[in-house]
Amino acid sequence: MYVHFDGYPDSKLPLLLAAFQYRFAGDLEAMARHLIDDVQHGWDELGTDLLDGAPAAVRAPLTGGDEWPSRQMADVIWADGTPAERELVTQDGTDELEWAYVLHPHGIEVVALQAYDRGPVVAWDTDPRSRITANPSAWHPDTRAPIVAPRPTPPLFATAPAQSRTPRKTARR
């Protein structure tokens, strides 16, 4: 399915991973139906509504606190006045596109279209908060996806050592 603002993997891949994990609860068929089958022409933009159900700890780093809806393309009319019909985007029709995301049962394939005709697959359980590069040459199909998992964060409140948890005796007067 065509997305006008197809976007670089550092912004779109986290959105798609989080959508799969939270909004669609791991149901690839439901995700594909929403993104591909139930769309008349294509998408202008994929929005933060794909993050419905994601916890704030995931949502906030992906959106920076901004919210915007996904928008389908309005009725498309070509320059000659004829209405557009839904087309399947194929390798032959990607001359002006930079990135493609292919949904597989085991993960999402990220293709840097200006450099390769296929790409590495990112597992569906990848943390959407991971650091992801948008450099097309890093997405060589025969290498691991250029993704660095987020650093674990320490708990907000560290527990006190066991010895300080014992009650203190207080002197009485």
Image (cartoon, grey):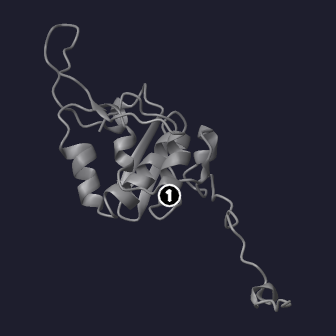
Q: Nearer the viewer, residue 80 or 156?
A: 156
Residue depicted at 62% across the width and 44% down the height: 133
Say whether residue 118 is visible. Answer: no
The percent coordinates of residue 53 (x first, y second) are 36, 56
Q: Is residue 20 left or right of residue 111?
A: left
Q: Is residue 86 above or below residue 50?
A: above
Q: Position of residue 113 (x, y in %)?
A: 48, 37
Where does residue 114 sit, x and y in percent of width and height? 52, 33
Residue located farthest toward the top when viewing the structure as drawn: 80
Residue located at (54% from left, 52% from top): 141
Q: Amino acid at mark 1?
A: Val
The residue that label 1 is drawn on is: 122
Q: Is residue 104 left or right of residue 30?
A: right
Looking at the image, the residue that sits furthest to the front is 173
Quarter placement of the C terminus? bottom right
Question: Residue 160's x, y, as percent?
Answer: 76, 79
Which residue shows up at 68% across the image and 62% down it?
153
